[in-house]
Image (cartoon, helix red, strand yellow):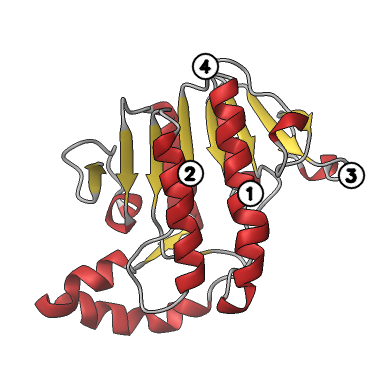
Amino acid sequence: MPQVFIAGGTGYMGQRLIPRLIGEGRRVDALARRGSESKVPRGAEIVLGDALDATTYSVPQDAAFVHLVGTPHPSPSKAKEFRAVDLPALRASVTAAVAGKASHFVFVSVAHPAPVMQAYIEVRMECEALVRASGVPATILRPWYVLGPGHWWPLALKPFYWVGEAIPATRERSVRLGLVTLGQMVETLAWAVENPPTGVRVLDVAAIRSAEVRGERSKGFSMA
């Protein structure tokens, strides 16, 4: 099974994804800055480096690269952080992945278009363009809001989503900007690692929600 390199392994999704991959028998290398080693889940190999500087770490050849670095709790007030952290971190990850001849690049983007979070969407679209231009086979996930510990408040909006998905005129938008759970994200990331594409694959909210093994017949799956 291919080795996995994770940038952002000490974060919200990374700390759940690493044990999931190790449980499948995979070797996982987790990038961490000095002083954050204790946050890396047990069983992963710690790679000390700066997520914003590709020269400070290296990626094993043929590894699957999972990029999870980003500004925590994104909001419209953090537009400067998206450009100071999210974009440079993605650029560094792509550079390191290409240099290491990674076999597959997995990136968590964001659903779009949307009526809010324009600065965040703009940066994530620039990141997607960098991923595509790298030439490395890639999976791009496009969730909108991820429900999980500390992130449960949107559950109050569920009735509005149900109504929106029931009305033909608003169904597509309601699904595209729908809610997914942290567990669904972790399972989708693990599935992506286990099933690398030959080109660039996009998994939207409908695909992330799918409990079935995802494939070309899955709703929400596209090659683009």
Q: Residue 88 bears which disc, if any? A: 1
For mark 1, give the secondary structure. Answer: helix
Q: In this view, does 28 lie above or below 12?
A: above
Which residue is denoted by mark 2 in the rendering?
107
Residue 122 in picture, x, y percent from top left? 45, 63
Left or right: 180, with 63 as reference point: left
Name the image quarter holding residue 172.
bottom left
Which amino acid lies under the numbered mark 1 shown in the image of this protein? Pro
Residue visible at 87% across and 40% down? 34
Q: Kindly tell me whether residue 14 is visible in this rendering.
A: yes
Residue visible at 12% across and 79% down? 169
| Alpha carbon distance from label 3 to label 2 | 25 Å
User: Which of these two is toward me, 61 or 55?
Assistant: 55
Residue visible at 24% across and 36% down? 215
Q: Does label 4 or label 1 sit earlier along the sequence?
A: 4
Which amino acid lies under the numbered mark 2 shown in the image of this protein? Phe
Q: Does label 1 or label 3 sit earlier along the sequence?
A: 3
Q: Residue 35 bears which disc, if any? A: 3
Which residue is denoted by mark 4 in the rendering?
62
| Alpha carbon distance from label 2 to label 1 | 14 Å
Left or right: 146, with 199 as reference point: right
Instruction: Decide: few, some or many residues near mark 4? Use Cα within 10 Å; few <14, some 14-19, many ≥20.
Output: some
Which amino acid lies under the numbered mark 4 shown in the image of this protein? Asp
Q: Number of marks in the image?
A: 4
| Furthest-right residue in this view | 35
Name the image quarter holding residue 30.
top right
| Alpha carbon distance from label 4 to label 1 | 23 Å
For mark 4, give the secondary structure. Answer: loop
Q: Is residue 32 above or below residue 115?
A: above
